[in-house]
Image: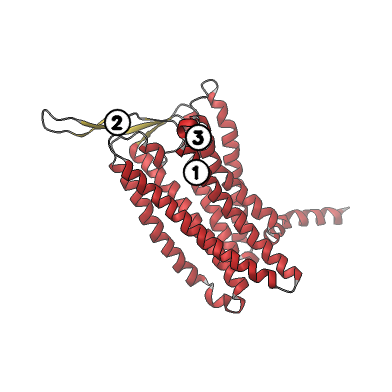
Amino acid sequence: MELVNLLSPGQNISLSFSEFILYPFPGVTNHRQILVVPFFSIYSAIIVLNFVISYTVWWEKSLHNPMYILIALLLALNIIGTTAVVPLMIQSLFGQNKVSFSGCLSQMFFVYSTTLFKSVVFLLMAFDRYIAICRPLRYHNIINRSSLIQVWMVGLVRNSLLVLLVVFLASRAQYCKSNIILNFVCEYGVLLSLACGEVFKIHMVGLMVRMGVTLSDVTILLVCYVKVLRVALKIAASSARGKALNTCGNHLLVALTVYLCGILSSIFYKVEESVSYDFQNLSSAVYFLFPAIANPVIYGLRVTEIKDCLMKPWKKKSSVSLNNI
């Protein structure tokens, strides 16, 4: 423990922990290390799948357009976000579960930054499809490197300010109830549950940030795709209509997967008294890991251009084998 504020004699001494212990899945008391196997396997699959598709987009010149670049960026954020969580989780399951207060805040910063940046990518994808389908003649004038960088910079400023605000508020609280975090990640709500004194206002600011960003981004997202849907249904050629709907459907499916997992995770934390800590941990794992492994599968299997590029080396090997027969 660390002495935070030494007051004059006769007054209370305010103490705050400077080190925390991550204790995920507290209900699993025997053979806890077995949990490493499924989570390490999922993490390895996330790294491989997201890297392969991101590398394919970077390597294949035919995929060098805004839509595929945004997909690659989203998959790179998946790698960063899970890497901020899973290695520390695996260490804690092996018993090396001590993390400093600054380490907790750093993890919180990276986790929330990647989450908010994914939301910016979803908005850019929706805007890209909106212009491509609703304003096709102006697409190259509106969607270019300069405009994407400008929107990304606006998102960077917004996200940085909001995440820094949340992390700063968390750093100002006094943590003296306990230094044991019954989870594998230093989330805002989980950390504040260990704080002493009045933290209601801090809780509310964090909730307002999360709900405000989610509601505003989801609203913009749905407005774009509703307009896209209306225009796509009016397209005479069935093949063009099907391609437009399939592309937008992929993006919307990926975005809703992330948002829905986040909402469900938040609900389980709000009813923590009726939900076990193990179930809360499981909901957090689904929130952090399921979208990260589902995104590359959706794009790899459902986006024809990416799937063809992924299958190209296998087709070459098959053709060489057939020629040698």
For residue 191, what is the image quadrant? top left
Question: Colour scheme in the image?
Answer: secondary structure
Q: Which mark is residue 176?
A: 2
For residue 251, what is the image quadrant? bottom right
In this rendered view, identify the residue nearer to me: 240 or 109: 240
Callout 3 touching callout 1 (CB < 8 Å): no
Q: Quadrant of the N terminus?
A: top left
Taking the spot 68% from the left edge, 64% from the top edge, the residue there is 245
x and y, in percent, of residue 210 in the image: 43, 50
Disc 2 marks a residue whose amino acid type is: Cys
x and y, in percent, of residue 236 in the image: 74, 74
* Cα–Cα gap, marks 3 and 1: 20 Å
Residue with the mark numbered 3: 280
Q: Taking 198 as reference, is 93 above or below it?
A: above
Residue with the mark numbered 1: 83
* Cα–Cα gap, marks 3 and 2: 22 Å
Question: Neighbour class for label 3 at 10 Å: few (<14), some, many (≥20)?
Answer: many
